[in-house]
Image: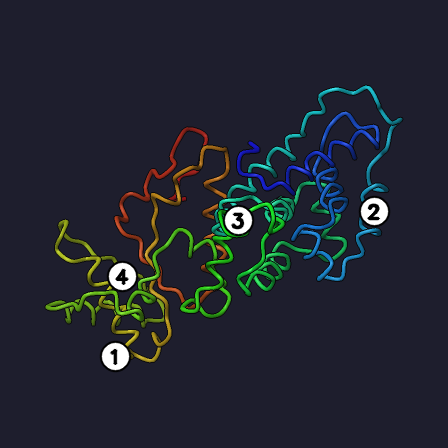
Amino acid sequence: MEGNFSNRVQDVIRLSREEALRMGHDYIGTEHLLLGLIREGEGIAARILKNLKIDLYRLKQKIEDSTHPKVPATQMGNVPLTKQAEKVLKITYLEAKICKSNIIGTEHLLLSILKGEDNIASQILEQFGVSYDMVRDELLSITSGGTESDEPQAEGFASSGGSERSQKKADPKRGERTKTPVLDNFGRDITRLALDDKLDPIIGREKEIERVAQVLSRRKKNNPVLIGEPGVGKTAIAEGLALKIVQRKVSRVLYDKRVVALDLAALVAGTKYRGQFEERMKALMNELERSRDVILIIDELHTIIGAWGASGYLDAIN
């Protein structure tokens, strides 16, 4: 599991084990991971907490008061992770992917802790007024300059994997901070392609594009479905709509809308842990609810039925 962890995160895990032993616990829980983040004190996670005006000493005291210390165990060998701590470490991979980072940093660990409301560390942070959205917004603010990394410059990560996130923010074409990181990761922004003049002109589909625009402009029953044989130009109509929006040749209701094509295969890919697909879908739906300017295109809509429909799991249609 440590293959993608930054040096700082590996230090945090080592320190969390020491904290567990210091408190006489025979397990490593989310509270120990949070203590490890505080004790490490130099990563982006610690900086985010400081920027949010969190007193790390008071936070440390609260964690220790909320747990029940035992007699310190000095001869304890292997200290296992609790199921909640294991889940948190697994979710860090998803958080790093959302941030388009190849390296898992302390910021992803902090976000993962806050993602689960049923763990002790998340509940304590909530008492201090810290939420997942607050940390994510602060992270976007910190990395918007395009130079931040959770690794020291000398360790060589700043110019490689850990900074796909930074490169994304440094791209002048992207402009302001994104409010839809999950959608950006699993979707293709057709409107952006139209703005960058990377789409071919659409010929012979004016009537269909106009009809789709009319349906989308309705207050209710505004979800058009394009049906046709492969290759007849269904996706081209979506691209034509994006071109019309950019050119302001649509009704005012559709001005400044983003046309984004969802890659369902990418959404399902890599979800080998139980609940991971549901986490992605939930995060995606939350973003779509908050972002009223997005027109979502689901290509090959029929494949959504049964997507990740293994026994014991919800499929995408639910």
Q: Pointer 2 and pointer 4: residues touching (CB < 8 Å)?
A: no
Q: Between label 4 and label 3, give the one nearer the viewer.
A: 3
* Quadrant position of the C terminus in the picture: top left
Relative to 237, 290 lies left or right:
right
- Evaluate if marks 1 and 4 touch, with contact meaning CB atoms under 8 Å apart: no
Check disc 2: other Cα within 10 Å, few if <14, some if 14-19, many if 20+.
some
Is 304 positioned to the left or the right of 279 in the image? left
Foreground disc of the pair 1, 3: 3
Q: How many marks?
A: 4
Amino acid residing under circle 1: Lys
Which SS class for mark 2?
helix
Identify the mark nearer the N-term, 4 or 3: 3
Q: Position of residue 307 (x, y in %)?
A: 35, 39
To which residue does mark 2 refer?
62
* Residue identifier under label 1: 249
- Badge 3 density bin: few <14, some 14–19, many ≥20, Cα 10 Å: many
Depth check: give the residue in front, 80 or 261: 80
For label 3, the SS is helix
Q: CA distance from mark 2 to mark 1?
A: 58 Å
Query: Which is closer to the viewer, label 1 or label 4?
Result: 1
Kindly identify which residue carries mark 4: 224
Identity, as a three-letter code, of the amino acid under mark 4: Pro
Q: Position of residue 126 (x, y in %)?
A: 72, 52
Instruction: Write down the quadrant of residue 205 in the picture.
Output: bottom left
Mark 3 and mark 2 in contact? Answer it, CB < 8 Å. Answer: no
